[in-house]
Amino acid sequence: YMGLFYTPERYAEAIGKIERYATEGGRSLQSFERLMYQYVFVAPTRPQAFERANVFLSHTHGISFEKHVDRFCVIGTVRDCVESLGGYLAAGVEHLMLVPTVLDAREFAEQAEICAHEIVPELRRRGQAA
């Protein structure tokens, strides 16, 4: 199962429903994987990250995302992002697909590096990621 545009709470609710339906139907979830497709942008400040994520999402989806960035994106400093992502992992996510909210290939690579070398190792250090 892969969530998109879910808060950690909504993700946990969805997984709870799936587990309940599986139990009621006598189905095993042994090979069931829990994923989250998560937009992310890391910046020196949360307002900078908010602005960048809003520009990307508004452009990509063709509507203003200003009211939704905080709800559907993991944004801010590395520390902010680690805290937010920890909420998804606590909600049952097993695999995070971190998607930088940028249009420029060079900046995408920079954001991917931050995710790979700063965010994921910190989640692992905290015991929140494999």
Image (cartoon, rainbow, N blue to C red):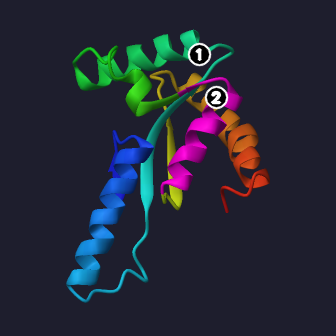
Q: Is residue 102 above or below residue 7?
A: above
Q: What stretch is highlighted in magenta?
A: 75-91
Mark 1–mark 2 CB contact (< 8 Å): yes
Dot 2, crowdedness within 10 Å: few (<14), some or many (≥20)? some
Front residue of 79/90: it is: 90
Provide the residue designation for mark 2: 80
**What amino acid is found at the position of numbered circle 2 in the picture?**
Asp
Instruction: Name the side, left or right, on which 90 lies relative to 126.
Output: left
Q: What element carries label 2?
A: helix
Residue 87: where, in percent of width, then height?
54, 45
Front residue of 57/7: it is: 7
Provide the residue designation for mark 1: 46
Residue 1: where, in percent of width, then height?
34, 62
- Is residue 1 at all visible to an observer of this figure? no
**What amino acid is found at the position of numbered circle 1 in the picture?**
Arg
Residue 28 inside the magenta-drawn segment:
no
